[in-house]
Image (spheres, rainbow, N blue to C red):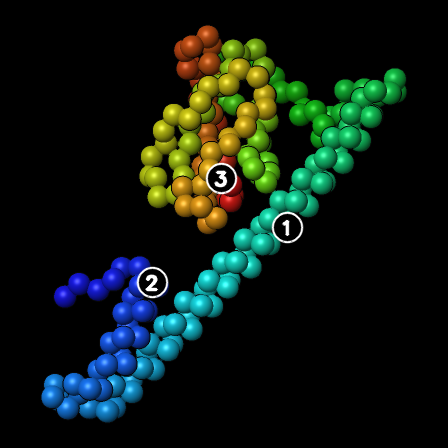
Amino acid sequence: MTLPKNETQFLLWLDNFTEKLPIYASTLRITEDEVRDLRTLKDDAKAKVELTNRSKQTYQSQVQEKNAALDKAEEEVRRMVNDAKSKKVYSSAIGEDLGVIPPERPLPQNTDEAKPEFWAIVLADLIRFDWRKLQYSGVVIHSKRGSEESYTFLDKDTQSPYEDRRKNLIPESAEARYFRMRYLDGDKEIGLWSDEVKVVCII
């Protein structure tokens, strides 16, 4: 027996089945209780599907509002930082204290120990990564998303920030993405992989 895999198609099929089943119930020796129980199961399934669909719409709306709020906050922060940097009294010490400039850390003595640091910000239509270049040529970026189990090559970048503009694998559905970076010396990968960074986005 083959039933429709799609939820909508299955519910349409189930409507037809439960509507016509009483015609053959006596012939097939199906009791009234069994017919009634099936109708109850069908109605419950339809109600749960409708509730899930409404929840998805609400979630998507909330994500859009959240992204818009983050965009506005970031825009204002960037305006204030740019204004602050234009003033003579601004210094790198102030920038570090405010978190505008990441605090300097000693460079690794051995390139085998070099490990990138980066930060992800989810915006309405992209994910932006800010990373510390130090003395290296750039970074190689790997990612995995959705049902992917292994990291694959995404891109190389020689100047922060990097932007991931890929659309979600399933449109309008929240998607988890994982990222890692490794430094480049020319075209050669060196050092350690960064810590994994996870984001959830709808792009």
Q: Nearer the viewer, residue 132 or 155?
A: 155
* Residue 90 in picture, x, y percent from top left: 84, 21
Please name the residue shown 27% across and 79% down the image.
Answer: 18
Q: Residues within 10 Å of mark 1 (few under 14, many from 20)?
A: few
* Residue 185 in picture, x, y percent from top left: 47, 10
Given the image, on which type of amino acid does mark 1 rest?
Answer: Glu
In the picture shown, does residue 3 fall above or below 131? Answer: below
Nearest-to-viewer mark from 1 and 3: 1
Tell me which corner region of the image, top left, top right, bottom left or bottom right, holds residue 112: top left
Secondary structure at numbered mark 2? helix
What residue is disc 2 on? 7
Q: Report if residue 170 is visible in the image.
A: yes
Determine the CA span between mark 1 and mark 3.
Answer: 21 Å
What residue is disc 1 on? 65
Determine the CA span between mark 2 and mark 1.
Answer: 29 Å
Given the image, on which type of amino acid does mark 3 rest?
Answer: Lys
Query: Which tag, 1 or 3, sits closer to the chain's start?
Result: 1
Determine the CA span between mark 3 and mark 2.
Answer: 30 Å
Please name the residue shown 67% across and 39% down the image.
Answer: 71
Given the image, on which type of amino acid does mark 2 rest?
Answer: Glu
Secondary structure at numbered mark 1? helix
Discs 1, 3 touching: Cβ within 8 Å: no
Query: Which tag, 3 or 2, sits closer to the chain's start?
Result: 2
What residue is disc 3 on? 198
